[in-house]
Image (spheres, helix red, strand yellow):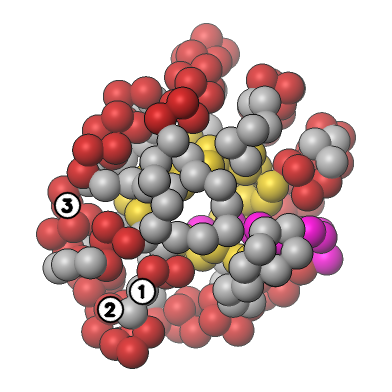
Amino acid sequence: MNEHIVAPSVLSLDYTHLKEQVRGLNESNAKWLHFDVMDGHFVPNITFGPIILHTFDQMSDLFMDVHLMISDPEKYIPDFIKAGADGITFHTEAVGNDIEHIRKIIDDLHAQSIKAGFVVKPKTDIKQFEPLLPIVDYILIMSVEPGFGGQKFMPDQLEKVRWLDAKRQEKGLSFRIEIDGGINETTAKEAYAAGCDTLVAGSYVFKADIAKQVDSIL
């Protein structure tokens, strides 16, 4: 089993206290920072681009985990790599759930020494991507509909996690299973029990003392 990692989502960070919040993240037991990149097209919201990622990369040595919720991931991946991305996940739906297209993007990321994975929306069947399991570093399961923070956790998405964990064990693989959406002290326990090892948490981490909130879901 991989070690547990918490990846606070900077989407929920209080930007009026940016330096203090980043200091809190750096001093916490979080190891990743999660960047929800939205383009207003693939999902009905717009967040931030490479310039913001670069700013955080200058302020923190944490692993920069970039989640692309955009319609044309290949076009913008180079910009995010240049800005400091350490790992990039992109939505299978953005490339028509085409396995060979997904494989090509993952291979291209690996060729640039970037950790690579894919993301699925709640209604997307995870099982069709079994051929890709041996080549990914991590897989991100959405436990809310992508587009906005603060949504309620969808427990039925843990079935995908259980399936991935079973395949991981069956095939002797080591990819991480990440989950994003509605994570708190209760749902974190459910996610770990299902097989997750990496939790994205936004509102929950930033609503109180960052270090204590991170520790409560490790």
Q: Secondary structure at mark 1?
A: loop
Q: Earlier in the sequence, mark 3 or mark 1?
A: 1
- As drawn, is 102 to the left or to the right of 175? right
Q: State how far apart marks 3 and 1 are (Cα).
A: 17 Å
- As drawn, is 135 to the left or to the right of 53? right
Q: Between residues 82 and 167, which one lies in front from this camera angle?
A: 167
Q: State how far apart marks 2 and 3 are (Cα).
A: 16 Å
Nearer the observer: mark 2 or 1; the answer is: 1
Q: Residue 185: which numbered mark, if any? A: none
156 vs 142: above or below: above
Q: Are marks 2 and 1 in contact (CB under 8 Å)?
A: yes
Q: Residue 215: which numbered mark, if any? A: 3
Q: Which residue is mark 1?
A: 13
The residues colored magenta run: 65-75
Residue at the spot 79% in from the left edge and 59% down from the top edge: 71
Q: Secondary structure at mark 2?
A: helix
The amino acid type, in three-letter code, at marker 1 is Leu
26 vs 86: above or below: below
Q: Earlier in the sequence, mark 2 or mark 3?
A: 2
Which quadrant of the figure has residue 129?
A: top right
Residue 52, horizontal then vertical, whole percent: 54, 81
Residue at the spot 62% in from the left edge and 51% down from the top edge: 89
